[in-house]
Image (spheres, rainbow, N blue to C red):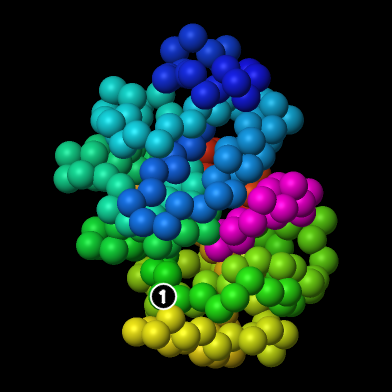
Amino acid sequence: MLFSQMLHATGFEHMPKKQFNVLVFSKTAGWHHPSILSGVKAIQQLGDKHFFNVVWHEESRYFNDDYLKQVDVVVFLATTGDVLNDTEQAAFERYIKQGKGFVGIHSATDTEYDWPWYQQLVGHTFVIHPEIQTARLQVESRQFPGVESMPDSLLWTDEWYDFTVARNPKLHYILSVDEKSYDTHSDWGTKQGKGMGEFHPIAWYQEYDGGRAFYTALGHTDAVYQDVLFQAHLYGGIYWAATGKGITR
């Protein structure tokens, strides 16, 4: 499917049968990341490369049982704030409980602060971030798909989120950032931050409430979505969330 066609697609009914169906959801009720369009294009390119269908919506009305039964993975792409009403939240909870998948990218942790179930699904909650800068990204686990080509440690430029403690004790961590490699101090006037300490997670996954959830904090800038290492990392998360496959022991 061409990107221009994807903009007008509403569902998966008339699409060819492929590996799986991915709904990209990017509604914002707070900060709107300019890189969202780059993220959508990158996921569509991954769909073309890896043979899965992609539909993109910024409207929450598609969170209902009839629509979600077509979907294998819902991607919250740089969502912010309160994006689903109570009825839509209930439909999404039922969707996950049916064994389906969730992928959160970047500010998906800056979303739905008053919905405890979602906070446990996404794993951690965003607190604050310093200025965009280069830091040392580190691979914590090679069991998860998508990090095969990533070196153990590499320089990476992004927006480094500080998080709360884990909302769920069953998280498995994939990537972290070395706080010694960048200036962790943040000052937003009413809120300050100084990093997370010895261990600062960046990406993780878990099985949750019958389904699967993957999150990566990377993805603030347009350039990140053009990076082949990030594309592989992101597809690893989408593939596992859709199928439950790819983890090595």
Q: Is residue 157 magenta?
A: no
**Closer to the camera in the image, 27 or 141:** 27
* Residue 119 at x, y percent in the picture: 33, 62
Q: Which residues are magenta?
A: 216-233
Q: Is residue 1 left or right of residue 229?
A: left
Question: What residue is shown at x 42% (from left), y 57% (from top)?
Answer: 31
* Residue 149 at x, y percent in the picture: 82, 56
* Residue 199 at x, y percent in the picture: 57, 84
- The image quadrant that residue 109 belongs to is bottom left
Q: Which residue is mark 1?
A: 127
Question: What residue is shown at x 45% (from left), y 76% (from top)?
Answer: 128
Q: Is residue 212 left or right of residue 244?
A: left
> Can I make out residue 15 in this image?
yes
**Closer to the camera in the image, 97 or 224:** 224
> Can I make out residue 236 in this image?
no
- Give the total of numbered labels: 1
Considering the image in quadrants, where does the N terminus appear? top right
Callout 1: few (<14), some (14-19), or many (20+) C-alpha neighbours within 10 Å? some
